[in-house]
Amino acid sequence: MADDKRRQGKRVSVDIVFHGGGHATNLTGKVRDLSQVGLFLATRHFIPLGKQVHLEFTLPTGKVDAVGEVRWIARGDRVEEPGLGIRFLRLSSASAKAIDLAIEASDD
């Protein structure tokens, strides 16, 4: 990606089905490119920039429960996969630990 500021911290590539959104926002897709600061949700269900979403999904290392904000949208009109770049606004300590463990496991 051209903007390295979007890529903070170590990341792990995951392929986990996600269903959720909350507050009349129904999202489905696959969680990919996960880090402590956010994730990429591969989906064709686009929601507006700045919209907050409730995220719940399970990694092999534990459950993640967070609130995030849509920071960028990839519409899939170029090479990239369509989806949403979501930055975490609230992430429980248990969720942060599950993400850390998933990243550590991917380094092995």
Image (cartoon, grey):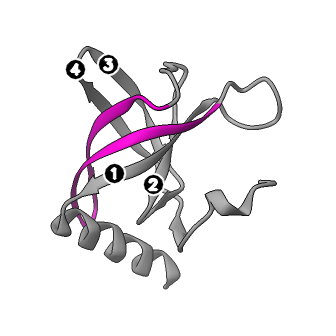
* Disc 3 element: strand
**What range is drawn magenta here?**
50-73
First of labels 3, 1 by sequence position: 3
First of labels 3, 2 by sequence position: 3
Whole-angstrom CA distance, mark 3 to mark 1, is 19 Å
* Disc 2 element: strand
For mark 3, what is the residue?
26
Q: Which residue is at a point 25% across and 14% down the rendered structure image?
A: 24
For mark 1, what is the residue?
89
Q: Amino acid at mark 4?
A: His
Whole-angstrom CA distance, mark 3 to mark 4, is 8 Å
For mark 4, what is the residue?
23
* Disc 4 element: loop
Quarter in which the N terminus is drawn = bottom right
Image-based side of 84 in relation to 78, left or right: left
Q: Residues within 10 Å of mark 4 (few under 14, many from 20)?
A: few
Q: Amino acid at mark 2?
A: Gly
